[in-house]
Every structure is written in C-alpha cells, then in structure tokens.
Amino acid sequence: MVSARPAVAAMPAYRPGRNPADLAREIGVPRAVKLASNEVAFPPLPAVVEAIATTAGETNRYPDNGATVLTATLAERYGVAPAQVATGCGAVTVLQQLTQAYCDPGTGIAFAWRSFEMYPLLAQVAGARAQQVPLVPGAPGGAADTHDLEALAAVVDESTRLVFVCNPNNPTGTAVRRAELERFLDAVPETALVVLDEAYREFVTDEDVPDGVELMRGRPNVAVLRTFSKAWGLAGLRVGYLLAEDPAVADAVRRTHVPFSVSSLAQAAAVAALASEDEVRRRCAAVVTERARLTAALRERGLPVADSQANFVWLPLGERTAEVAAALESRAVITRPFAGEGLRVTVGTPEEDDVFLGALDAVLTSGGAAAADT
Ligand SMILES: *Cc1c(COP(=O)(O)O)cnc(C)c1O
C-alpha cells in the first residue's frame, strides 16, 4: 500500500457543517437556518449574476491565468501597482501558496490560537512548526477572545517565516487596534512576513481598527489578505487576493499558484462585484445593524458576548458548546461549534436570527446548558 506522508496521514478529516437541506429533511422542517460559515444572507449581486451569464459562453476556454482585468481593478481600487497584487482560488488557497512559497520543513508559522482553523493545518502540511500564542481576555474576567500581540511578537524567532494576524479574529470577532498593531509590526523582524488576514474587513466599524492596506505602506514584510467570499457574496465561486508592499511577495505567491485556479466565472464575478461596491456597502451596513441587535439580544440573556467587528458573534460556552450546538441543530439551526470553547454564530437576516434566538432560548431553558460557562 502506498502511504501518505505522515504529516498528511495525521491530519484530522475535514468535517463540513451540516447541509441545511439534509438537516431540514431529517427533522421534518421546511428549512434549516444556516449560521455556520459566515456567508452573507443576501443573494448574489445582480451585476454578478449578469457577468456569470455572459462569461458562461466562454467556459470552453481556459481562464486568463494572470487574472489581468481583476488584478488591474484591484490595484486601482487600493492604490497599489498590479505587481503588488496576487489573486487566488479563495483566500485559503492564497494562504496555502504563501506557505509553499516561504516555509521549508522546520521553519515556523506564528499565529494566535484560537484563530482561523486553516492556520495549523497549513503548518502541518508544510512540515512547519506552528508557533501558537493563546488569546487573552479582551475584558477583565472575560473569555480569552483577543490577540496578545506582545506575546505573538515574542515568539517570532529566526526560524519564523510567516505570521498570521486575523483581524478581526475568526472565530471570536474581536479586532486589534492601530497603536498596538503598529507597535507589533515595528517589533517583528524583517525576516518574517506578517500577513494581516482581513477576510472580514468590510464589516469593521471601529475607526481605531486600522486598514491593513494603509499599515503595510513602507513595510516590505507586511501583506494583506482579503476575500470575495464574505461581504462580496461570492463564497461559491472561490476568489481571494493578497496585496503586498513588496512586489516580490506577490510574485512568490504567483509562482506557487495552481495554473488557471481562479476560474473565468470567478474573475468576471469579482470584477462585477467591485463595480457594485455601493450596494455591497449597503449590505454590510445592514449586517452591522443586525450584528448590534443580535449582540444585545444575547447579552440580555446573560451571555457575555464580546463586541464583534465581523459578521458573526462568539458565544464562549466552554464545556457546554458541543451540547448546545447539537441541541440547536435538532431545532434546525446550524452554527459552528468549537468544542470546549465556544459557538460561532453568523449574523443572518433578522428573521433567521430570531429563529436562532428562539431555539437558543428553548435549549438554554430545557436543562443542561443554563448560562455561559466563563
Ligand atoms: C473565510 C475566511 C477566509 C477566506 O476564505 P476563502 O473563501 O478561501 O476566500 C480567510 N481567512 C479567514 C479568517 C476567513 O474566515
């Protein structure tokens, strides 16, 4: 028998969230509410649907491997040169390209934990050391939900090639602010590339939370990761991108990309989405309004929910997490549990969130899972 590499054999099998249609059928309800993957609840933008329809007639051909139009559009939007932009088949693939480009076995990748679940897996496949730094309470006596940038800077050593800072942090929703992030970037040696993962940037409302694209100026070891999967509504098409101060970083990411991995549909849709930015902003504003309502409703129930700067909220339920998530699923609401830590709940439509709150009330009052376990 041919054996997979030990690092690969040791990887946990990927377990996707429950499919809403299957779950609805199983428990005999018309529709399950999916609040598990941080998509926006709005349908695709009209301009996106139109662009896909137009491009459908060209799908017998390979896509533009350099994503020239999308790259130029992004460069113009962010005020950088096209050479500073690299697109990928979802931001996750860009992260994979970064590890392929920078991490030999034995090198280090530093990041906070808990954070985006892909980070440790990327390190494992690369044979790199995951230099994990625990989150700390953002509020006195609260749950550990916030980056400890001083500690993160302290673990960066000469073996560290990449540092991921997820801002706002998935799954806790908290964000680090300008002064501490600038101090952190000043402290990290130029031999490590700091990647600011801003998958949720469009939902940030705190003016003290800096735009990574502004922070990276003049810092050749800083890059910013963004995606079309969340605010821009293209999760099903797979397109993300990196903006780097040093064009050599974008070049390294381009060198490791799987040819043609950003499809022609994805490229056309992303360009159309960028042209619909006003509508995207209106949608994000609606999400932000609903985020505030959901947060307040959860706090009224005695749950210590941190201020979220993303399109999800974090319920630090501790040991009760898995049980609460399962009980919610039996009531047709799919959330994202991190067993033993907490539940991540995507901000849905007001109607979806009311279904979630009703199910949560039923779960919390039906014994077992009483209140937050802090
Ligand atoms: C969703 C997400 C991404 C990007 O996902 P893609 O769909 O691959 O673009 C990247 N980072 C974080 C933290 C995310 O939550």
Image (cartoon, rainbow, N blue to C red):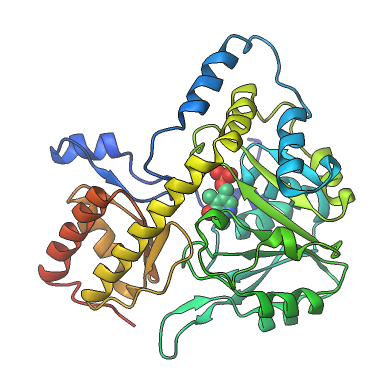
Q: Is residue 119 shown above or below 21?
A: below
The residue closer to the viewer here, 213 or 77, is: 77
Residue 201 appearing in the image: yes
Would residue 227 appear left or right of 362 to someone viewing this image? right
Q: Is residue 170 shown above or below 273?
A: below
Q: Is residue 304 shown above or below 172?
A: below
The residue closer to the viewer here, 63 or 8, is: 63
Q: Position of residue 240 (x, y in %)?
A: 64, 42
Which corner quadrant of the image does residue 258 belong to? top right
Would residue 66 appear left or right of 226 to someone viewing this image? right
Q: Position of residue 317 (x, y in %)?
A: 32, 73
What residue do we see at 12% from left, 62% from top? 362
Q: Residue furthest bottom?
A: 140
Q: Residue furthest front?
A: 278
Residue 11 appearing in the image: no
Would residue 245 appear left or right of 96 to someone viewing this image? right
> In which quadrant will I find the N terminus?
top right
The residue closer to the viewer here, 300 or 78, is: 78
Q: Residue furthest left?
A: 366
What residue do we see at 74% from left, 82% from top? 154
Q: Position of residue 212 (x, y in %)?
A: 69, 61
What residue do we see at 21% from left, 60% from top? 357
